[in-house]
Amino acid sequence: MYHPDLIRHPDGCPALVLNADFTPLSYYPLSVWPWQTAIKAVFLDRVNIVSHYEREIRSPSARIKLPSVIALKQYVKPSQFPAFTRFNLFLRDKFGCQYCGSGSDLTFDHVIPRAYGGRTTWENVVTACAPCNLKKGGRTPREAHMPLYEQPIRPTSWHLQENGRRFPPGYLHETWHDWLYWDVELEA
């Protein structure tokens, strides 16, 4: 019997990682492990296999189907506040310039310029497209007559997870759908 998983290279078989309560550890970036890490965790008895690919790996003495969904045996408490990274900043601002709304050629901008004592913090940095960043220059939004769409805030992990659901990853194995969209409103 033919199945697409059977011709898939093992490197194309990541495992979706669920917490011990069967919720994803992270929605965006999606919490996935490479197949080698997932198999190691299985043999170390740190995870339960929830679902698997049809693709097998073999050793001289064993064969095992690659896990597609695994659940940690011990609950990991999520961090309340995410790290301040470029990716998390773009995610907070929904991958759009906070001056014009463009989603291309993105960079970041200090609302209060560093020359004025502005710091590189959640509350002072926003996503900006390169043309708006250049136009604003070393001025404040008020001086440049460029109002912000939203004032910058320090997001919670929950806030970023909610924003991340709007940007589904490029790869979703069919066995992942039940675990990623368990809280989505059902259609009538």
Image (cartoon, rainbow, N blue to C red):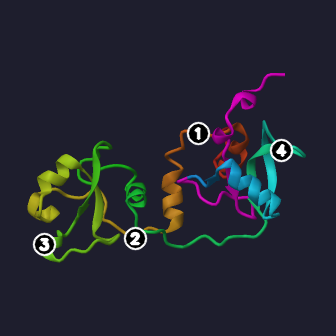
Which residue is under mark 1?
Answer: 171
Alpha-carbon distance for marks 4 and 2? 49 Å
- Indicate the amino acid at tag 2: Arg
Q: Position of residue 134 (x, y in %)?
A: 14, 52
Quadrant of residue 57 within the rendered picture = top right
- Residue in the picture at 64% in, 39% down: 12
What predominant SS class does the magenta segment belong to?
loop
Q: Residue furthest top?
A: 1
With 168 as the anchor, is 135 left or right in this view?
left
Q: Which residue is mark 3?
A: 115
Q: Which residues are magenta?
A: 1-29
Vertical arrangement, residue 158 with respect to residue 53, above or below: below
- For image coordinates 74% across by 49% down, the residue present is 69
Q: Earlier in the sequence, mark 3 or mark 1?
A: 3
Residue corresponding to mark 2: 154
| Residue most extreme to the left | 143
Element at label 2: loop
Q: Is residue 182 visible?
A: no
Q: Give the number of the mark in front: 2 or 1.
A: 1
Q: Is residue 28 visible?
A: yes
Sequence-first disc among 3 and 2: 3
Point out the frontmost of discs 3 and 2. 3
Q: Secondary structure at mark 3?
A: helix
> Which of these two is toward me, 168 or 60?
60
The quarter in which the N terminus is drawn is top right
Give the residue at x 79% y 22%: 2
Please report whichever mark, 2 or 1, sits nearer to the chain's N-terminal start: 2
Q: Amino acid at mark 4?
A: Ser
- What label sits on residue 59 in the rendered view? 4
